[in-house]
Image (cartoon, rainbow, N blue to C red):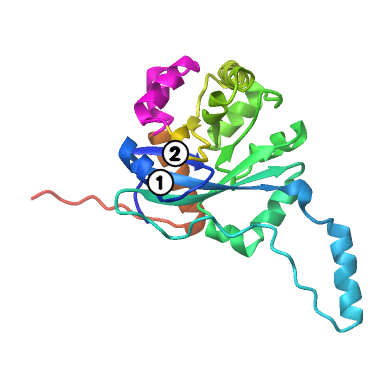
Amino acid sequence: MKTPYGYCDLRVERVNDDIIDAYIKHGYALIAVNTTVNCLLLGNGSSNKKKRKFAECNDETVEEKDWVPTPKLINDNDSKLTILNRLTIQITNIGQLQKIMSSPNFKLYNILAVEPLNDKVFQDIVTSPSVDIITCNMKTSITPKDYTIAVEKNIYFEISYCPMLFSSSTRQDTFTLAHLLYIKGKSKNLIITSGAANKLDIRNPHDVMNLGILLGLSRKQSTKSVTQGCYSIILRSYGRKLGKSAIHLKPMNSS
């Protein structure tokens, strides 16, 4: 387990040698390669049960489909750049989260982000100990109470800057989301990611921090959005994999 350090980008949509070289050139120390799963495409639970029951009656076996793909990059850490794997799931109910977490491939990912597709599931995930990042948009109904609960649970929100490069409408949407997160929770526990799919999308961390100020973050919040905030997410994910543990501290007598 590596202790996180340096500048981080926790959402990279594609990875290749050119992108890795670009991140190293820009001075990043850690990135997370993203895989997105839309849970609306998951099979119906009741129909799956019927298939299993039918197979048992006919002495057949039904191979369960793993709806979580393998990560885009596994254990390929450059000495100058730590590469983690992130899974983003789009869900309409909390049961889909449980189904994803029971997948064998889920264990191959380091970070879990959830994009709620309705207001009810948003209220459910802010109390989940398994969620690291909540990905939302300007239409997501966020209450100050839910935002506060997420912060208390050490769950982070994110803003990706690559959509701002595409058109004036997506740029305006990003500013609207940033304003919403400021109004609902003073932009607490907010990280800025790229969502980069090619090397031309990547911006150096100082430009990202300046962008954070334009998005309503304080200078301290903007710096934390690519450093300490990301460290907190990574350490939380490490802790989830390690499970519960206890330590005993004993003071040493100075001689």
Instruction: Give, as a three-letter code, the residue at label 2.
Output: Lys
Dot 1: within a 10 Å radius of its alpha carbon, few (fewer than 14), some, or many (20 or more) residues? few
Residue 5, visible in the rendered structure: no
The secondary structure that most of the magenta stretch takes on is helix
Residue 91, visible in the rendered structure: yes
Q: Position of residue 151 (x, y in %)?
A: 54, 31
Q: Which residue is mark 1?
A: 18
Height in image: 5 above or below 159?
below
**What kind of element bears circle 1?**
helix
Q: Kindly indicate whether the residue at mark 2 contacts the one at mark 1 (C-beta within 8 angstroms).
A: yes
**The magenta stretch spans which residues?**
203-226
**Which label is found at residue 199?**
2
Dot 2: within a 10 Å radius of its alpha carbon, few (fewer than 14), some, or many (20 or more) residues? some
Q: Quadrant of residue 209?
A: top left
Q: Position of residue 19 (x, y in %)?
A: 42, 44
For image coordinates 64% across by 36% down, the residue present is: 126
Q: Position of residue 231 (x, y in %)?
A: 40, 41
Instruction: Give, as a three-letter code, the residue at label 1.
Output: Asp
